[in-house]
Amino acid sequence: MKKLFLLLFTAFLFIGCSSDDDTIYDYVGTWSGSYEGSDKGVWNFVVDKSGKVVGTMHSDISDENYNISGNLSETGDLNATLGLPSKGEFKGTLSPKDKNGNGNWANSLPTPPKSGTWKGQKK
């Protein structure tokens, strides 16, 4: 009886510890891509092991750089701000399985306000 219990207990442990569960470590690294809308250009950022996101968005139109700074959840939800010289947001979702990401961005400065979508992948 003890052997049967141990066998079932071990089976449940393996089922409960599936490798399909995403962790922040699945997102760690450099991500980059392009954005478009009322402005267009390229972006890149690095996700560290704590989920902190730091990077840059570069406008092809105005030739300006905007800092990306924020956090990524263990489920891949990105919540970042755009700063200096603009005031905005850079939000979306990253997927470690296909190493792709996408979302929306918006700038309220410089005027007039600008917004659009972004997409990219993990390098």
Image (cartoon, rainbow, N blue to C red):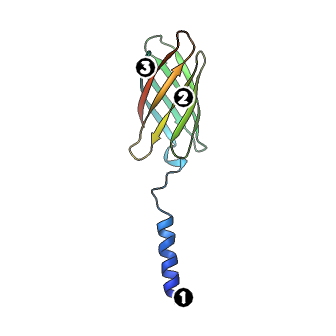
Residue type highlighted by circle 1 = Lys
Residues packed near mark 2 inside 10 Å, few (<14), some (14 to 19) or many (20 plus): some
Which quadrant of the view contains residue 99?
top left
Q: Which residue is found at the position 56% from the left and 43% from the top?
A: 73
Residue type highlighted by circle 3 = Gly
Is 87 drawn above or below residue 103 in the view shown? Answer: above
Q: Can you identify the residue that label 2 sits on?
A: 55
Q: Can you identify the residue that label 3 sits on?
A: 41
Which quadrant of the view contains residue 122?
top left
Q: Which label's residue is closer to the chain start, 1 or 2?
A: 1
Is 57 drawn above or below residue 70 in the view shown? Answer: above
Q: Which residue is found at the position 50% from the left and 42% from the top?
A: 76
**Judging from the image, what secondary structure is the residue with disc 3 in?**
strand
Q: Where is residue 48 shown, x and y percent of the image?
A: 57, 40
Eye-nearest disc, 1 or 2: 1
Q: Where is residue 8 shown, x and y percent of the image?
A: 49, 79
Give the quadrant of the C terminus.
top left
Q: Can you identify the residue that label 1 sits on?
A: 2
Q: Which residue is found at the position 59% from the left and 15% from the top?
A: 85
Q: Which label's residue is closer to the chain start, 2 or 3?
A: 3
